[in-house]
Amino acid sequence: MVYPRITGGASLLVALPLVSKTTLIIGDGTLAATRATAALQADSKVIVVASSLSEVSSDEIRARGENGELLIVEGPIEDVLAAHGTNIMVAFITDTLIGAPKRRDLASATALRDTLKKWNILVNVADIPSLCDFTLPACHRFTLASSPPNSSQTPSSLQVAVTTNGKGCRLAGRIRREIVSRLPDAIGNAVENVSRLADMAKASVEAVNNNKESALASSQLHEDSLPLTPNEPVEQTIGVYESKEAAQKRRMRWVAQISEYWPLEHLAKLDVAQSEQILRQSFGESAACSPNGDIQGQTIITQTSISSSTGPSSQHDLALSSTTHFGQIYLLGSGPGHPDLLTVAAYNILTCRATLVLSDKLVPSEVLELIPSTTRVKIAKKFPGNNEDAQNELMVEAVDAAQRGEIVIRLKQGDPMIYGRAGDEILYFRKHGFEPIVIPGVTSAIAGPTFAGIPVTQRGVADSMILCTGVGRQGKPSRLPGYIRSRTLVLLMGVARLGSLLKTLLDKDVDPSLREGEAYPANLPIAIIERASMPDQRVISATLETISTAMAKIGEQRPPGMIVVGWSVLALYGSGDIKVLDDAKLLSESASDLHAADQARIERWLRGEGWRVTERFNKWT
């Protein structure tokens, strides 16, 4: 196995908890005050070693010392360490700052650092990188959206940090500002709201239903304990009794789904009542007796009865006057992700006609932001194991709204007719008196590979493509086609099931109900395209035998993702390779020679490595 080449020059970025620990700051100027403030915000005790107690340079340090927020001392560093050294975790030597009056010289700074190191203290020396055990990135801590507007700003739990690893500190500060300016003003609220929702999800069923705040933190289950992809398949749970622990884990999967897909602006407005509604209605939970008649921390998952007139209103609800005429339902494709890829028809309907938008969770926030604020927006509560129930909820709500005279948009990613359940919805709406209008969208099945530089068809490489889903009805495996050299296989909704899909493709003795035709060669190129057309698009290129290791090494995934399998994956890389079919004709009499030729093209494509990750999106505007 060939692993990616290590390229040094990075830092191991960590968030250092300093609760009940002490931060030592040597110097009493402006930089010392900045370091003291940061340490205090991290709940650290702070000791400032000043040259003179009577002549502290920083007014802030002097004031905080008088208020008892920090301790100011003077005297030999050895005496300070003897009194406090066992509890000191980090130290900042700030009087080495270039331009500082009475700047400490290199020899003195080196000796001081060596003394601190004997106490196993991590040291940062201003403007002398060679003496630093750690550096500080350019940081920003977000505040909660204040109400009323003129009230004081309350810090949130969200911080961002940017480092250039010493290659441009001022530029790092600018990049930090650019990041902060592009995030919603209430992004800090989103973090706090999701944290609260996670606490509620970890609580017992009784605590959630009765709003017993004291029980919210009863479980130690955390989002980090869940799979790296929130779309990992799970069993359908309708009508199944669950233990308390299983119910908690299922609710935490839903929190992960919301964190991944819901627009940040929506998360920022999520209040306690809406959180309770999400946890109840999303799962249809009710405390229930077990088969032997007992209630022992179990939950039964039931089909939820949805009515637009029941339950608390969401933050998107808009009171509309009653109407006597029927409305209209649109099934609208939003394209692969980037808002510029909406059709003109889709844009006009979303921005000018819609009164209610029922959106799938995969539609990115950049598209939802185009919808006027006066239009109600609701996002599908789908998560693995709950898709059928959530789908029914959306269809019922669409009909109810249309009967009130509203213009209802069922907003789907890509094209609604390609694995978008459009057929089910058309028949349902028609049965209830509405003939929906279907507005096509640019399908990710074609656009995704295009943005990744992969032609699904290419003369000399692939003369056909076949589109499949990675999962069948009710989460069951779908039947995949066999290998044909001249064909590209595109799989939607399959990344979370990559392991089982690879087994189906590669196993020569696989059950015929899972694959129809020949097994795929292990060295066949494969690409996993994540967040196609979006600024954070990522493409993982490998072979069928190395892709699992690549995904495991990469770790966290970026849904939604799609899979492309076939020789077209490498066709346009670099100087190109469009002789795949010609080689097959020339070497048709020798399977070993053809395998050797294919292996050589794989080596050229991946340059001797097991895989390649490309994070690049060529924006056209």
Image: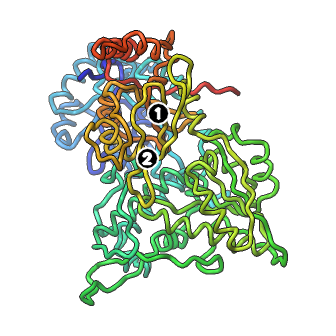
Quarter of the figure that contains the N terminus: top left
In space, the residues marked 2 and 1 are separated at their CA atoms by 12 Å
Asked if residue 50 shows in the view, the reply is: no
In the picture as drawn, the residue positioned furthest to the front comes out as 589
**Nearer the observer, 54 or 490:** 490
SS under mark 1: strand
Asked if residue 178 shows in the view, the reply is: yes
Residue 492 drawn at (x, y percent): 49, 43
Is residue 572 rendered to the left or right of residue 249?
right
Residue beneath label 2, please? Answer: 470
Residue 117 drawn at (x, y percent): 19, 27
Looking at the image, which residue is at 27% across and 17% down? 108
Please tell me the numbered disc located at residue 371.
none
Residue beneath label 1, please? Answer: 564
Q: Amino acid at mark 2?
A: Gly
Q: Amino acid at mark 1?
A: Val
Task: Determine the image quadrant of residue 285.
Answer: bottom left
